[in-house]
Amino acid sequence: MRVLTVLPRREGYAFDRAGAIALLVSRLADADDAVLGCPVDGDPLPGGRFVPIEEVGAPWSWLSENMRYQVACQRAIRRLRPDLIEVHNKPALAAALSRQAKVHLILHNDPQDMRGARSPGQRADLLKRVRVITVSDWVRKRYLDDLDDAPVTVMPNCLDLSALPPRLTQRKPTVLFVGRMVADKGADAFVRAWASVAGHAPDWKAVMIGADRFRFNSPRTTFIDRVEAQADAVGIIHTGYQTHAQVLAAMAEAAIVVVPSRWPEPFGLTALEAMASGAAVISSPYGGLPETVGDAALRARPDVAGELESAMLRLIGNDAEREELSRLGLERARGFDVPAARQRLMTLRRQTVSGDLGI
C-alpha cells in the first residue's frame, strides 16, 4: 500500500521545529510511507521517507501560499501515485486532493475553526469525500455539531514509551510548565499561581519551557515579554524553546507537571507525555484533556481563583499522593503506546483502500 502523508504547510518535519503533528506522523509512519511537507534544514524526522515540496512558480505566483501549496501537493501526487493520502488538519486541502486518491482527513484541532469545515454543510460534504479521523471524542463531537451521527473515527494520539528517557526514582522538587508561551496555554496563570505558592514551598523551584512557536528562532511577543518579567519577579526559571528531547528529559526529572490550558485542548499531548514520564500531573478540565488524563491527574481551572494554587500546594505537600498519581499516570499512558496505535491505523488504512466503507 502506497501512503502519502501531507503535513500542514507550516508544520516543520525536523527535530528543531517539530510540532505535535510532525512528531505523531513520524511515530506512526511505515518505512515506505512518503511524508510531504515544506523543505527543512538538516535531517528530517526519522518516520517514513520525507519528500520536500517543490515550490511552484509562474504561472502560479499570483495564488495565495495555501493554494500554491495545494498545487505543489497535486503535482507530487501525480508523480508518487499513492493508494491513500492522509491530510492532517486541512479540510479544504483534503477535499481538493480527494479528486486524485482516497483520503483520510486527520483532525488534531477544532474543525469549526478550519477553512473548509466551519459550517455544518461543509462538514457534511466532506464526509462524502474523505474519511474523517479525530484525535479525541471532543473533536469528534465538534465535527458532528449540528449534524446527524456519522462515521467519524476517533484515534487518539500516541507515544513511543520505549523511546522515553529513563525516569528518576527520586524526582527533583520542580513544578514544570511546558507549552507554547501564549495565553491559550495558561502560561500567565502558571506564573500567577506560583507567585502565591513559592513562599510556602522554599525547597521547590518552578521552571517554564516554551516559546511562541515550536522552533529555535521563535519570535518574541509582547505576551512573552510580560510573562517572563513576571516570572523573573517570582523566581521562575524560563528556558525559552527546547527541543522535544530536552522537554522529555525535563519531564523525566520533574515531580509535578502543570498543564493549565484555557484553550480546550483537542487531546493534550503534553499531559500524556508528562504522565508517561512519571510526573504527577495537574491538568485543566477543558476540551479533550479529561479524556487523556482520566483519573490520573488533579484538575484545576486556570482562571478560577485559588484552584491552580491549591492543586500545586496539595501535591507539593503530599509525597504519597504524588507517587500515587505518578503510578496511575504511567498505567494510563501504556494505553497510548505506539504499537497499538500503529496497528489501529494500519487497519483503518486497509479498510479505506479496500473500499469497506464506500469511500
Image: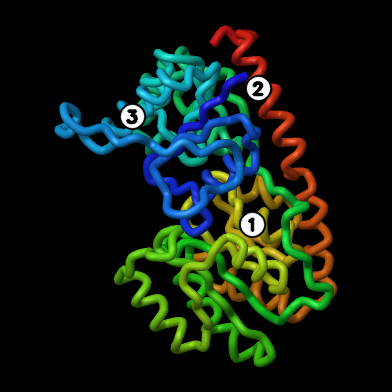
Q: Specify whether residue 69 is in view.
A: yes
Q: CA distance from mark 1 to mark 3?
A: 36 Å
Q: Residues within 10 Å of mark 3 (few under 14, many from 20)?
A: some
Q: Residue at x 46, y 56 (%)?
A: 17
What kind of residue is marked 2? Leu
Looking at the rendered structure, the secondary structure element under dot 3 is helix
Q: CA distance from mark 2 to mark 1?
A: 26 Å
From the image, tell me which residue sits under label 2: 348
Residue 300 x, y percent position in the rendering:
60, 63
Q: Which mark is residue 271?
A: 1
What kind of residue is marked 1? Ala
Q: Which mark is residue 72?
A: 3
**Closer to us: mark 3 or mark 2?**
3
| Picture quarter with the C terminus | top right
Q: Residues within 10 Å of mark 1 (few under 14, many from 20)?
A: many
Left or right of 339 on screen, residue 188? left
What kind of residue is marked 3? Ala
Q: CA distance from mark 3 to mark 2?
A: 27 Å
User: Between disc 1 and disc 3, whose residue precedes?
Assistant: 3
Label 3 near label 1: C-beta < 8 Å? Answer: no
Is 341 in front, or is 79? Answer: 79
